Image (tube, rainbow, N blue to C red):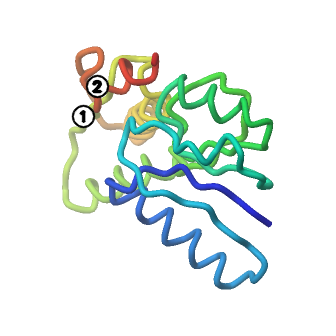
C-alpha cells in the first residue's frame, strides 16, 4: 500500500501525526509512505502529478491545496478539519472530549467561572465545536461561561489561507 503524506512538519501536533504514521508502518509491513517535509502554505511537490499510489493523508491548509489533491483522483483523508464541505473523510481529535478534559482540569484546580476563546464563527470549525461544547458543559454544570471571539483571520491566518 502506497500512501502520500502532506503534513506540514512545523507544528508539534503535525510531527506527532508523522511519528504515529511511521509507527503504524513499522508495525504493518507492506506500507510505503511518500513524504516531503513542508511548511504551512508550501506548494505541493512536483512529484505528485506522476505519483502512482493508493491514497493521500493530508492536513489540508486551503482550497488550492484541496483542489490539487482531489485532481489526483486518489482517495484523500483530511487530517486538519479546517475547511468545511470538502467531501472527503476527515480524522481529528474528539472536540467534545477535549472540551470536557479542559473543563475538568480547570474545575479540579478550583475555578468556578469560565471563559472560552475562539475564532469568529465559521473560521475554524473544530474550534467552533470545542468552544460550543466547553460553554455547554460549563453551563450544564451550573457555572458561568463567557465566550470571547478573536478578529477575522486572527487564528493563524486560517480564514485568509483557507480561501486560497
Q: Residues within 10 Å of mark 2 (few under 14, many from 20)?
A: some
Dot placed on the residue nearer the N-terminal end, 1 or 2: 1
Q: How crowded is mark 1: few (under 14 residues within 10 Å), some or many (20 or more)?
A: some
User: Which quarter of the image is occupied by the N terminus?
Assistant: bottom right
User: Which quarter of the image is occupied by the C terminus?
Assistant: top left
Q: Distance between the residues labelled 1 and 2?
A: 6 Å
Residue visible at 28% across and 32% down in the picture: 156
Are the residues flagged by discs 1 and 2 in contact, CB closer than 8 Å?
yes
Query: Front-most of 57 and 51?
Result: 51
Q: Is residue 50 left or right of residue 117?
A: right
Query: Front-most of 157 and 51?
Result: 51
Q: Is residue 99 left or right of residue 70?
A: left
Residue visible at 50% across and 62% down in the picture: 17
Image vertical order of residue 12 relative to residue 152, above or below: below
Q: Is mark 1 on a helix, strand or loop?
A: strand
Asked where in the image residue 112 lies, by quadrant, the reply is: top left
According to the image, label 2 marks what residue? Answer: 147
Q: What element carries label 2?
A: strand
Query: Percent from the top left, x then y, of residue 20?
Result: 54, 71
Query: Percent from the top left, x then y, of residue 96?
Result: 52, 45
Image vertical order of residue 93 relative to residue 144, above or below: below
Amino acid at each position: 500500500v502506497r500512501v502520500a503524506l502532506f503534513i506540514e512538519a512545523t507544528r508539534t501536533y503535525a510531527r506527532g501525526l508523522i511519528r504515529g504514521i511511521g509507527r503504524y508502518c513499522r508495525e504493518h509491513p507492506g506500507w510505503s509512505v511518500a513524504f516531503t517535509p513542508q511548511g504551512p502554505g508550501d506548494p505541493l511537490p512536483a512529484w505528485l502529478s506522476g505519483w502512482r499510489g493508493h491514497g493521500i493523508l493530508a492536513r489540508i491548509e486551503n482550497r488550492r491545496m484541496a483542489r490539487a489533491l482531489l485532481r489526483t483522483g486518489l482517495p484523500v483523508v483530511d487530517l486538519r478539519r479546517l475547511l468545511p464541505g470538502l467531501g472527503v473523510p476527515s480524522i481529528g481529535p474528539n472536540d467534545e472530549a477535549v472540551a470536557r478534559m479542559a473543563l475538568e482540569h480547570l474545575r479540579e484546580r478550583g475555578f468556578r467561572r469560565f471563559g472560552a476563546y475562539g475564532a469568529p464563527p465559521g473560521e475554524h470549525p473544530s474550534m467552533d465545536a470545542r468552544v460550543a461544547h466547553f460553554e455547554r458543559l460549563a453551563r450544564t454544570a451550573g457555572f458561568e461561561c463567557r465566550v470571547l471571539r478573536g478578529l477575522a483571520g486572527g487564528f493563524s491566518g486560517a480564514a485568509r489561507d483557507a480561501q486560497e
